[in-house]
């Protein structure tokens, strides 16, 4: 299988408009994270590069149509982060904690992380999230997302509804 290496992501997610209207929620161990979505090759290439901060209640999820070896590298990243790879049903199959940025002095000689187990998606969280919420391999995450074009992407474990909010799944049922 061809190994895809995507730049890892870091930075502030203060605006969900970085890639347009896409976004949503990722849930893990009773915690909800406001998610940015990287669904296109261009979004996945750019990710959260050059950002200086990632709030502890934010993340970026890289969505793929098929399982694969989705390794990452930290070129052009400014801060460390935690990364979680999940199967199509949301099961955590691989994790990397405190993944450090790669110094610009290294050029393209940055190490890769993850991608040793086939996964459907991966999610990048603020450094310390895995430990803070007690996430382990085998746990299940869920996601309730909307792509830039309005397509809902719902999967994994059930995402608890936030009070007063309508989920992408509920919007799809209503349509």
Image (cartoon, rainbow, N blue to C red):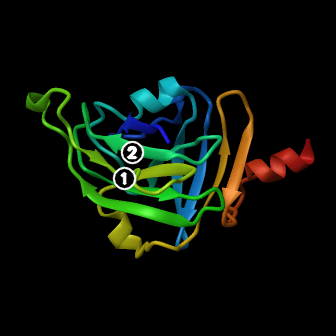
Q: In this view, does 165 lie to the left or right of 45?
A: right
Image position of 157 with respect to 83: above or below:
below
The answer to whether residue 55 of the structure is visible from this angle is yes
Name the residue rendered at 39%, 62% in the picture.
Answer: 95
**Callout 2: few (<14), some (14-19), or many (20+) C-alpha neighbours within 10 Å?**
many
Tell me the element at label 1: loop
Image position of 93 with respect to 149: above or below:
below
Which residue bears the numbered disc 2? 71
Q: Which of 145 and 69 is in front in this view?
A: 69
Name the residue rendered at 43%, 37% in the picture.
Answer: 4
Q: Are marks 2 and 1 in contact (CB under 8 Å)?
A: yes
Instruction: Quote the CA–CA distance across marks 2 and 1.
Output: 5 Å
Counting residues from the N terminus, which is met first, the one under dot 2 or under dot 1? Answer: 2
Which residue bears the numbered disc 1? 114
- Residue 38: x and y in percent read 52, 36
User: Where, by quadrant of the figure, is residue 116 drawn?
Assistant: bottom left
- Residue 16: x and y in percent read 52, 36
Q: Is residue 150 left or right of residue 32?
A: right
Image position of 92 with respect to 104: above or below:
below
User: Where, by quadrant of the figure, is residue 150 drawn?
Assistant: top right
- The disc label shown at residue 105, or none: none
**Callout 1: few (<14), some (14-19), or many (20+) C-alpha neighbours within 10 Å?**
many
Tell me the element at label 2: strand
């Amino acid at each position: 299988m061809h190994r895809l290496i995507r730049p890892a992501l870091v930075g502030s997610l203060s605006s969900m408009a970085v890639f347009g209207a896409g976004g949503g929620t990722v849930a893990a161990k009773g915690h909800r994270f406001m998610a940015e979505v990287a669904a296109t090759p261009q979004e996945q290439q750019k990710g959260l590069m050059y950002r200086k901060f990632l709030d502890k209640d934010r993340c970026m999820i890289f969505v793929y149509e098929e399982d694969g070896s989705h390794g990452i590298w930290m070129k052009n990243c400014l801060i460390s982060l935690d990364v979680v790879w999940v199967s199509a049903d949301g099961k955590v199959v691989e994790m990397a904690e405190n993944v450090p940025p790669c110094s610009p002095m290294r050029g393209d000689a940055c190490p890769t992380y993850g991608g040793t187990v086939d996964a459907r998606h991966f999610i990048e969280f603020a450094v310390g999230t895995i430990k803070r919420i007690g996430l382990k391999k085998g746990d299940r995450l869920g996601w309730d997302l909307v792509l830039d074009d309005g397509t809902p992407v719902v999967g994994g474990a059930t995402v608890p509804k936030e009070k007063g909010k309508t989920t992408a799944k509920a919007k799809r049922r209503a349509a």
